[in-house]
Amino acid sequence: MGDWSVAQMAELGARHARLEAEGDLEGLLATLVDDPVYEFHPLGRKMVGGELVKQFYTQFVERFLPLRHSYGLVGEWVNETAVAQEYDVSLQIEGIVETHRVLGILQYGEAGLLGGERVYASERFIRLMTGPVFEALTPL
């Protein structure tokens, strides 16, 4: 990683999180390497590759973000290889608000881009977040 610093990793993680919250699909995809890897724990599933991740984020913006009632950052931890962000995310589904605790660990890839993410959340949250892409997830 050479000259990559904790400050640069913090900025990259903050930018990715902001773009995700804003639903900026193109900006969000521009923070990732060509073939990112997303792991979902404790479910033990993953998605690999730029095309699948693009499908995921497209439906994330179109279908998942409209469910968001509120969200709040619980904590964040940064080093030169990763940013861990813990959130409480409240979704409103058919008039009912449900809150989920989610931990996402953004991982450095190369050339100032993210190589992917490890997401720790309930199966319900992962199914809601991934939508139809859930069926394309493969075992770790």
Image (spheres, helix red, strand yellow):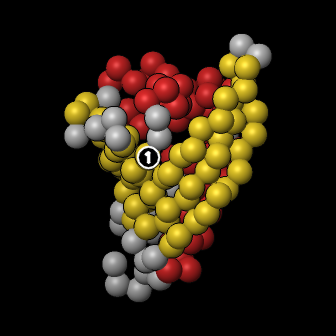
Work out which quarter of the rendered image holds the N terminus and state it: bottom left
The image quadrant where one finds the C terminus is top left
* Residue projecting furthest to the left: 140
Residue 65 lies in quadrant: top right
Q: Residue at x 44, y 62 (%)?
A: 113
At which x and y percent is residue 70?
Answer: 75, 40
x, y percent for residue 126 = 47, 32
What residue did someone put label 1 on? 119
Residue closer to the observer: 104 or 53:
104
Residue shown at 56% from the left, 80% from the top: 7
Residue 125, compared with residue 109, is above or below; it is above
88 or 7: which is nearer to us?
A: 88
How many numbered callouts? 1
Dot 1: element: strand
Q: Is residue 80 left or right of residue 15?
A: left
Percent across and percent down for residue 37 are 33, 47
- Label 1 Cα crowd, 10 Å radius (few <14 / some 14-19 / many 20+): many
Q: Is residue 27 visible?
A: no
Above/below status of 123 relative to 101: above
> Residue 49's quadrant in the figure?
top left
Residue 47 lies, with reference to residue 97, above or below; the image says below
Instruction: Kindly tell me whether residue 136 is visible in this rendering.
Output: yes
